[in-house]
Image (cartoon, grey):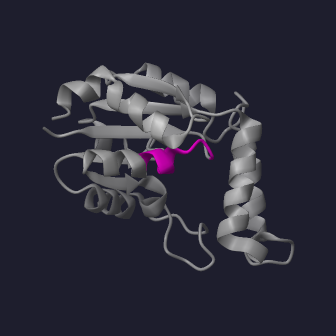
Amino acid sequence: MTRRIYITGAAGTGVSSLGRALAQRLHVSHADVDDSYWCEDEPPFVTRRPKPARRSCLLDQRGTGGWVMSGCLEGWGEDLIEEADLFVFLMVPTPIRIDRLLRRERHDYGRRILPGGDMHRSHERLISWAARYDDPDFAGRNMYRQEAWLDRQTTPVLRMGGTLPLLRLVDQVMAHKAIRRTYA
């Protein structure tokens, strides 16, 4: 049987990590929206791919059959997840998310994110953008719009706290009835 899971949440909730781990457990492909959303520039995360190219990349990443897709498709790619068996919405308090993002950025880019570095401005924009997720008036992606979008879906939604150890999160998703039903 095919298994198709879409995982979403704010930046720093662990959406990509859970996506990779679930895909490995299920022996299916993993497609991460960020890998398709941004052009492979240097410095990274500067140029957005046009929507048709993003969609094509995501379809290539997920392949045929079962898949796990992680990231944010609301507003431009909802049809790519119409066949999902389950949506997973990860939630993590903002201070923890920001700390995770800062640690990840320092690990991945080091001095490049410091003042004077070629990624300093994009790093500052990322942290500022991510910190506004809880603001209902924020024009960018925010928790209130994402929750409203999830409430309109017919696919089952599993809301989870993303501070648990990764393997426990994987086990919780695997225990959901929508996955047990399709997992062979």
The answer to whether residue 126 shows anywhere in this view is: no
- x and y percent of residue 72 in the render? 48, 44
- x and y percent of residue 177 in the render? 29, 20
Question: Is residue 11 a member of the stretch shown in magenta?
Answer: no
- x and y percent of residue 71 in the render? 47, 47
Q: Residue furthest left?
A: 1
Question: Is residue 17 a member of the stretch shown in magenta?
Answer: yes
Q: Residue furthest right?
A: 115
Q: Is residue 36 left or right of residue 83?
A: right
The residue that appears at 69% across and 43% down in the rendered structure is 97
The answer to whether residue 100 shows anywhere in this view is: yes
The residue that appears at 52% across and 64% down in the rendered structure is 48
Magenta: main secondary structure: helix
Q: Is residue 2 left or right of residue 19?
A: left
Query: In front here: 139 or 162?
Result: 162
Q: Is residue 125 left or right of residue 32?
A: right
Does 87 appear above or below 2?
Answer: above
Query: In front here: 157 or 124?
Result: 157
Quadrant that contains the N terminus: top left
| Residue 91 lies in quadrant | top right
Numbered range of the magenta stretch: 12-19
The residue that appears at 49% across and 24% down in the rendered structure is 159
- x and y percent of residue 120 in the render? 78, 69
The residue that appears at 32% across and 46% down in the rendered structure is 25
